[in-house]
Image: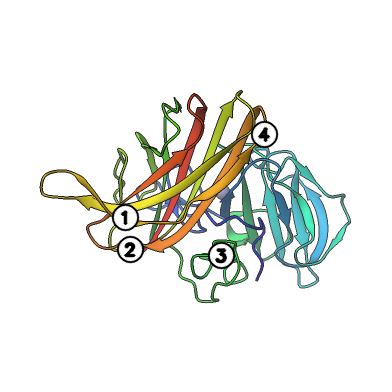
């Protein structure tokens, strides 16, 4: 069982419903997501989830211009879309061998790999099947590296994507990330988090992607989550602080960082994401993908 984007977690699972997907539409017009998405910075390595032979394919421009199908002797194939580069047609790949790099080509709102499993060669709604259990829906424990996981990992109950507006860090200390924009699929209620998100009572997997720019010499940018609730006086009371993740920023330019967390949150609690960097650094975008299990 191999994760096709090592170090990154699924951000939109197979089978989620939404009006922007067209396969197997229900009576409200919501189709299913035919693959599993891994949001990751452009350039992140994509590897073969199963071995086979690389075919350069074109299953529609919505999937971008560097599409790969890894074909297997049993007639099934794994399909990799939205990449910015790919290994040559005809390459034989083993599990874990590079097939390309994450990109943002085709019909996307951000860089990610769209990964599908087909029960035969080519593309149609009827050929797409759930790629579980040969990929991880939720890496086991809190390691977050994509290791572990069980074959019977259930598909998440629902998923949401939260976006921040960009802002400039006003101090060198922890700053909250707020989420004024939310995209939801058809199931589950999504709250705007300003800045706490109501994750209480469920198991979750969350991937934070941040782009940050600065021009003040090398620095570090750190992200973490804190969990808590408002007390009777309306004050934020922290019950748990999760270990921070630190990223080094080059002496100038942009850093694109990713921080994936797996956990469960006590009922009634909220989770806040925080960032610490040098005062004056500009957060150009922050996006959070959350998957919930009941
Ligand atoms: Zn997708």
Alpha carbon of mark 1 to alpha carbon of mark 3: how far? 26 Å
Which disc is residue 130 wearing? Answer: 3
| Circles 4 and 3 in contact, beta carbons < 8 Å | no
| Circles 2 and 1 in contact, beta carbons < 8 Å | yes
Which residue shows up at 28% across the image and 63% down it? 266
**Regarding mark 2 in the picture, which secondary structure is present there?**
loop
**Regarding mark 1 in the picture, which secondary structure is present there?**
loop
Instruction: Return the x and y of residue 241 as percentages of the image width and height.
Output: 37, 55
Q: Is residue 109 visible?
A: no
Confirm if mark 2 falls within 8 A of ligand 1.
no
Instruction: Return the x and y of residue 116 as percentages of the image width and height.
Output: 63, 57
Tag 2 residue: 202
| Screen quadrant of the N terminus | bottom right
Alpha carbon of mark 2 to alpha carbon of mark 3: how far? 23 Å
- From the image, state whether disc 4 or disc 3 is nearer to you: 4
- From the image, state whether disc 4 or disc 2 is nearer to you: 4
Nearer to me, 140 or 122? 140
Q: Quadrant of residue 50?
A: bottom right
Q: Residues within 10 Å of mark 3 (few under 14, many from 20)?
A: some
**Regarding mark 3 in the picture, which secondary structure is present there?**
loop
Vertical arrangement, residue 10 with respect to residue 149, above or below: above
Tag 4 residue: 250
Confirm if mark 4 falls within 8 A of ligand 1.
no
Q: How many marks?
A: 4
Q: Earlier in the sequence, mark 1 or mark 4?
A: 1
Alpha carbon of mark 4 to alpha carbon of mark 2: how far? 37 Å
- From the image, state whether disc 1 or disc 4 is nearer to you: 4
């Amino acid at each position: 069982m191999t994760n096709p984007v090592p170090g990154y977690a699924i951000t939109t699972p197979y089978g989620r419903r939404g009006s922007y997907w067209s396969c197997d539409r229900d009576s409200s017009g919501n189709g299913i997501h035919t693959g599993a998405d891994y949001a990751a910075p452009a350039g992140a390595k994509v590897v073969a989830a199963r071995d086979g032979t690389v075919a350069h394919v074109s299953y529609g421009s919505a999937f971008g211009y560097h599409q790969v199908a890894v074909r297997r002797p049993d007639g099934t194939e794994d399909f990799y879309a939205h990449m910015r580069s790919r290994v040559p047609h005809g390459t034989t790949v083993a599990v874990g061998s590079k097939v390309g790099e994450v990109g943002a080509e085709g019909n996307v709102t951000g860089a990610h790999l769209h990964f599908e499993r087909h029960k035969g060669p080519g593309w149609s709604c009827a050929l797409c099947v759930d790629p579980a259990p040969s990929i991880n829906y939720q890496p086991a424990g809190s390691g977050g590296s994509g290791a572990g996981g069980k074959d019977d990992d259930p598909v998440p109950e629902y998923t949401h994507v939260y976006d921040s507006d960009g802002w400039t860090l006003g101090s060198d200390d922890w700053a909250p990330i707020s989420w004024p924009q939310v995209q939801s699929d058809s199931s589950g209620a999504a709250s705007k988090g300003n800045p706490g998100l109501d994750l209480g009572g469920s198991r979750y997997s969350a991937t934070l992607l941040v782009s940050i720019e600065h021009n003040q010499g090398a620095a570090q940018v750190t992200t973490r989550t804190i969990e808590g609730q408002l007390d009777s006086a309306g004050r934020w009371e922290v019950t748990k602080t999760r270990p921070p993740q630190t990223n080094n920023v080059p002496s100038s330019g942009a850093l694109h960082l990713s921080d994936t967390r797996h956990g469960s949150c006590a009922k009634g609690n909220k989770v806040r994401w925080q960032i610490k960097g040098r005062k004056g650094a500009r957060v150009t975008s922050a996006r959070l993908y959350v998957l919930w299990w009941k």
